[in-house]
Image (tube, grey):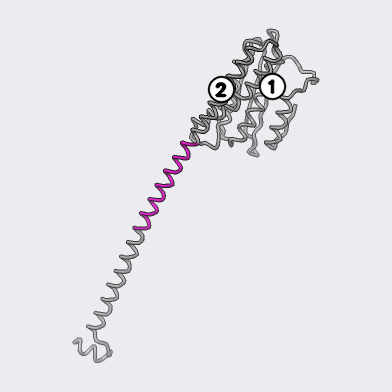
Amino acid sequence: RTMAALAGETGVDPFEEVHRQTVEQIASLTELRQREEQLIAANAQLREVERALRASLEEKDVLMREVHHRVNNNLQIISSLLNLQASRATEAAVREELAVVGHRIQSLSLVHQKLYHSDDLSHIDAGGYVQDLCAHLQSAFAAGTGPVALTVEAPRQQIPLDNAIHLGLIVNELVTNSLKHGFRDGRGGHIAVSLHRTDDDSLTLTIVDDGRPDDGSRRGFGMTLVEAMVRRLDGTLTI
């Protein structure tokens, strides 16, 4: 059948129809090409934004590390000044109190020191932090106590920065209390520290020693500080 016969039967010129469809297809392809170019341009812009954000985050990370480094250095300077003042104090009670304050500052300094070397600047490994803090305290009190074995059972577990600061002050006060008052006059013994996560995702800190018993009559600033830190952590304290 000829094209003329088809045109007579349908009333449509096949050539015009083919031309019309060809034009529509070309228009569709042109539109698709334009959309593809727009998507390519949008993707390029997104990559630029992503690169800018990544650079900004890296810069922020560097700045935060520098902040923690400087805070750590400043705390170390304060600790050194306290040690210098303690060495010049004539009264043993004054030297002792200055040393206690120095240990509290050291517990804060250690947090910033660990964050400076950490991949995550908002969290800290509580297990490693408690182990290092206890090792520092044992070394600091070694000259004034008998042979004290201090064992720490604290697996790696990440906790927020603020919680780490409160936890560190609690550990510092309780371990310091054991070393200061439980093992004087050459008395030896054992201090056990454990930090474990419970089934409800909270942490349980336990500190036990077999040093000289405390009659409970001595209540200083240290225990007041511990209770305040426990409240900050929404925790409970059992003695």
- Mark 1 or mark 2, which has the lower sequence index? 2
**On the rendered structure, is 55 left or right of 107?**
left
Residue furthest bottom in the image? 8
Please name the residue that numbered disc 2 is placed on: 77
Per the rendered image, the range of residues in magenta is 41-63
Residue 124 x/y as whole percent: 55, 33
Q: Is residue 227 placed above or below 53 in the rendered structure?
A: above
Q: State which quadrant residue 201 falls in.
A: top right
In which quadrant will I find the N terminus? bottom left
Question: What secondary structure is the stretch in magenta mostly built from?
Answer: helix
What residue sits 38% from the left and 50% below the top?
48
Look at the image and say whether residue 61 sits in the magenta stretch: yes
Element marked by disc 2: helix
**On the rendered structure, is 195 left or right of 69?**
right
Residue 56 x/y as whole percent: 44, 43
Look at the image and say whether residue 238 sits in the magenta stretch: no
**On the rendered structure, is 11 left or right of 58?**
left
Disc 1/disc 2 C-alpha distance (Å): 32 Å
**Which dot marks residue 208?**
1
